[in-house]
Amino acid sequence: MASEELVPGRSCSECTLCCKLLAVESLDKPRAVWCPHCDQKRGCKIYAERPDECGAFYCGYRRIATIDERWKPSKAKFLINYEADTQRTVIHVDPVRPDAWRVDPFYRTIKLWARDAAAEGRMVIVWTGKRATIVFPDRDKDVGEVRDDQFFLPVEVRTPTGVKYDYEVVEPDDPRIAAAGGC
């Protein structure tokens, strides 16, 4: 990401939560576990040699101008990421504070993001460790623990009041994945 895409005046100083909440494939580091190269008070101990996926990452607090200082991960206890390949907004929550995202102004804003995402066929998902919650404009769906190789498949559910859009967690060999374009 180019530095001109970052919100001026915001930095990572005094925040290392991404080093805990995000998986780092090249380091074999799972989600919601502190990176062994992170000094929680000082930052990355291998900064000059850190993996490309770490060096290219900037959380939503650094990129979204419409949110304020309360959204800094070290304060909010979660971080925001947009996954362009899957077109989803992802909130990674510190398992020590699993309901941090459900407090206002966060929850109200996340619900607005869910409304906009649903209108565009995208999703908002909250990860608390391996546990996933899909945020819809009208409800939140806890889908339980989801493995890294599983997929979220969009589905239509017919109800007496019409069609409701939902997601199912499916296995990687589910033939519906190819028809949906991979989710």
Image: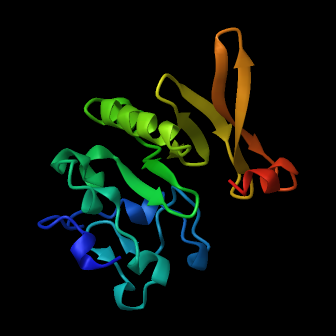
Q: Is residue 130 left or right of residue 6?
A: right
Residue shown at 38% from the left, 53% from the top: 80
Does residue 37 appear anywhere in the picture? no
129 is higher (above) or lower (below) than 33: above
State which quarter of the image contains the N terminus: bottom left
Residue drawn where x is 47% and y is 83% of the image: 52
Q: In this view, does 122 lie to the left or right of 45?
A: right
Which is more toward the observer, 122 or 147?
A: 122
Q: Would you say 131 lies left or right of 170 here?
A: left
Instruction: Please name whichever residue, 147 or 150, is drawn nearer the observer in this view of the structure.
Output: 150
Q: Which residue lies furthest to the left in this view?
A: 9
**Where's residue 170, x and y in %?**
78, 45
Residue shown at the point (38%, 30%) measured from the top left: 102
- Side (left or right) of 29 relative to 57: right
Asked whether residue 180 is in view, the answer is yes
**Residue at x-position 60% and y-position 73%:** 25
User: How are the colours assigned in the image?
Assistant: rainbow
Please provide percent x and percent y for residue 115: 43, 33
